[in-house]
Amino acid sequence: MRRPYLMADSTAGRSLSASIPGHGSFTVTGDALAMIEVFGGLLHCYQGPGGCRKQGLYFSRTEPKKPIRCLLGDPERFGGGSRDGWIQAGGEEIVVSVSHELAPKLGGAVLDFGSYNKMQRFVWLSLPAVKGPACTCRRSFGAPAGRRSPCLDDQGLGLNDL
């Protein structure tokens, strides 16, 4: 059973902060929240091999056995460790989780959904903890893997499990 973290109707057009327990936090844009709701209310973010860089950034509509679930809250209503501004309600919930490998890299990041490289997709607009240039499709990070390495866009998939 999923724990209710955010009422879907409370996301209308605003960005929320996603706090990763034991790590930092990142921003989830209103467009990303709306699409998470469309895709069933759950988004899991993780890294894996592949892509034009050494590490690919992937998104899934299913969670593995031990994800890190993020607390979603309004950044204007919380601060100083208080949980008063955290949005935790029943009903239609939105759950964002991350892998243990990706969690330390997401401090200050921005998760968005929009048209990138001629395709509607989830992307990390910024990953401040990751040094070096980002790939053009924003789906991979690290040192270039070589000219013959496939891009994560080769199949034109936005989510890996559609």
Image (cartoon, grey):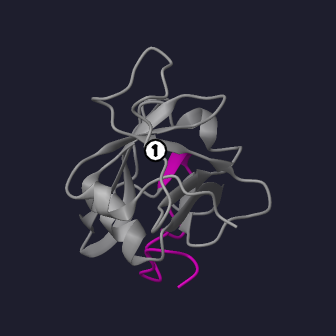
* Image-based side of 130 in relation to 36, left or right: right
The quarter of the rendered structure image containing the N terminus is bottom right
Residue at the far top in the pictured view: 80
Depth check: give the residue in front, 85 or 46.
85
Mark 1: secondary structure: strand
Residue assigned mark 1 = 72
Depth check: give the residue in front, 33 or 139.
33
Q: Residue at x 53, y 70 (%)?
A: 150
24 in magenta: no
Asked if residue 9 shows in the view, the reply is yes
Q: Give the overall secondary structure of the magenta segment.
A: loop
State how many labels appear: 1
Asked if residue 145 shows in the view, the reply is no
Residue 5 position (above or below residue 150)? above
Q: In the image, which residues are magenta?
A: 140-162
154 in magenta: yes
Residue at the far front in the pictured view: 90
Amino acid type at circle 1 is Leu
Depth check: give the residue in front, 59 or 42.
42
Return the x and y of residue 93 as percentages of the image width and height: 48, 63
